[in-house]
Image (spheres, rainbow, N blue to C red):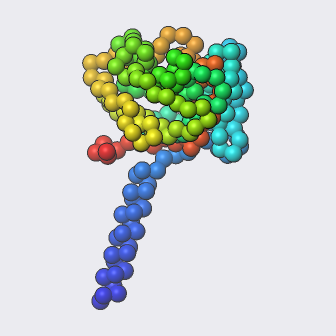
Amino acid sequence: MKQLNLLITVLVAATFSSCVTTQQSGTSMLEKNSIGKWKPTDFAGHGDVTVKNGVLKLGMGIELTGVNWTGELPKGEYEISFEGRRVQGNDFFCGLTFPVKGSHATLILGGWGGALVGISSLDNLDAAENETGDIYVFEDGEWYAITLRVQKNRIRVWIKDKEQIDVDLTDRKVGMRIGEIEQSMPLGIATWMTGSEIRKIQIRDFVEGEK
């Protein structure tokens, strides 16, 4: 009887552990040595775009360099997580454009000379002008773990597991900054006069009630 109870306990624990892992894990958006479902964005004067050993390399361009996701797009609330770093230049090493609230916006990491973080745009104000804008010093060559969570009326961002942005979108206008960056829609990554590397990028559905 004790052995049966022990077996049941082990099976229940294993099932629970499996459910938790499945809920938290995401779908990888990068292949090891192929650009896969990404395609280089047709920015004028863009740098080289390659993938090697699971790392997406965006070469420094005259201005913008980037990629667009051609795979399935999120349909509800979701999270995108990745690690990124600046390897050349001194401006944003990641401008992650994403669908939100029937429109699109861009998460800027390292803009305006290398240290601006924020969302462009809210109420026609870009990351340097709205309340999401903040200073964050990114060290060249250092990997930074980023998580973007998109909900019906909320955007949250974590850098190295510390919450950086939490903005309520109720009664707010969300949209792209006007310009070439609009080519990153509906889902894309871009840099500005900067070379960067992105790895471990995943996307997953966000389940309401999670922390």
Image location (x, y in percent) of residue 25? 46, 50
Image location (x, y in percent) of residue 85? 58, 34
Q: Quadrant of residue 43?
A: top right
Q: Pick whichever, 184 or 75, lies toward us.
A: 184
Q: Pick whichever, 87 or 23, lies toward us.
A: 87
Q: So how many labels did they put on this image?
A: 0
Is 85 situated above or below 209? above
Q: Is residue 168 left or right of residue 192?
A: left
Q: Kindly tell me whether residue 71 is visible in this rendering.
A: no
Q: Kindly tell me whether residue 126 is visible in this rendering.
A: yes
Image location (x, y in percent) of residue 41? 64, 22
Quadrant placement of the C terminus: top left
What residue is shown at x 39% (from left), y 57% (from top)? 20
Image location (x, y in percent) of residue 140? 60, 31
Q: Is residue 170 left or right of residue 158?
A: left
Q: Is residue 85 left or right of residue 25?
A: right
What residue is shown at x 36% (from left), y 69% (from top)? 13
What residue is shown at x 38% (from left), y 73% (from top)? 11
What residue is shown at x 29% (from left), y 89% (from top)? 1
Q: Pick whichever, 121 or 183, lies toward us.
A: 121
